[in-house]
Every structure is written in structure tokens, then in C-alpha cells.
Image (cartoon, rainbow, N blue to C red):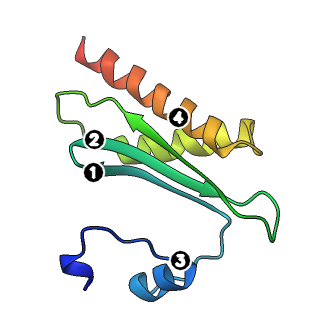
Amino acid sequence: VVPVASMLTPNQFEVELLTGLRLLCNLVVITSLNIEGNLLLIGSHQKLKGQPPHQFKIIIPKIPAYFTGTGDLMTALLLGWSNKYPDNLEKASELAVSSVQVILNLLLK
């Protein structure tokens, strides 16, 4: 069904089954997702065990150019901002996206 599905909404067990990976982390960020022409970052984090996770999305402005290494840059910046804001994954993600955008736009000049 997955190859022809128009939407997937897996829970943790289903993600682990589909990917063959065990999700042990309460923090998950997909840094680049293209949905209907929109570039998104989506994230989920559970602050307290037993509480539902907080989920968020950030629409990333597209830059009409090709770059290499942006995933590594995003990961490094997300890690750095997460260390500064350990209890606010959404803010760390927003700052990481903004930082990448500034750097890429500077490269275009």
C-alpha cells in the first residue's frame, strides 16, 4: 500500500516496521520534505513521558539555485542551536533554518 498511498500517518511502531529502525529518541526532525511544491521541515518532541508530543512545521523559502552540503550544514546548525535551547526544539529548528537561509543567500551574492 505504501507505494500508492497519498498520505502516510505512521505511529512509532509503524515507522520502525517500515524503516527497520528502532526510534529511541523523543526528538525527531525531518529537515527537508517536499510536499506539493512546498519545502518543509517537520519536527516532533515529547517533553514529558506519557504526554503527547509537540509537533511543528516550518515552511522553508526555496532558493532558485543548487547547493551541496546543505543537509550537513542544517544538521550542524540544528545541533548547535539545540544545545543553546535544549528545551525548545521548535525554536532551535527555526534558528537553524534561518541560519541556512542567510548563508545560502550570501553565497548567491
Q: Nearer the viewer, mark 3 or mark 4?
A: 3
Would you say residue 69 is visible in this rendering? no
The answer for how far apart the CA atoms under marks 2 and 4 are is 18 Å
- Disc sitting over residue 38 in the figure: 2
- Can you identify the residue that label 1 sits on? 35
Q: Residues within 10 Å of mark 1 (few under 14, many from 20)?
A: few
Sequence-wise first label, 3 or 2: 3
Would you say residue 24 is visible in this rendering? yes
The answer to whether 95 appears left or right of 41 in the picture is right
Residue 45: x percent and y percent? Answer: 66, 57
Q: Is residue 28 above or below residue 88?
A: below
Q: Nearer the viewer, mark 4 or mark 1?
A: 1
- Disc sitting over residue 96 in the figure: 4
Residue at 73% x, 36% y is: 84
Q: Residues within 10 Å of mark 4 (few under 14, many from 20)?
A: many
- Can you identify the residue that label 3 sits on? 11
The answer to whether 23 appears left or right of 5 in the picture is right
Q: Is residue 106 above or below residue 6?
A: above
**Secondary-structure class at tag 1:** strand
Q: Amino acid at mark 3?
A: Asn
Nearer-the-camera pick, 90 or 54: 54
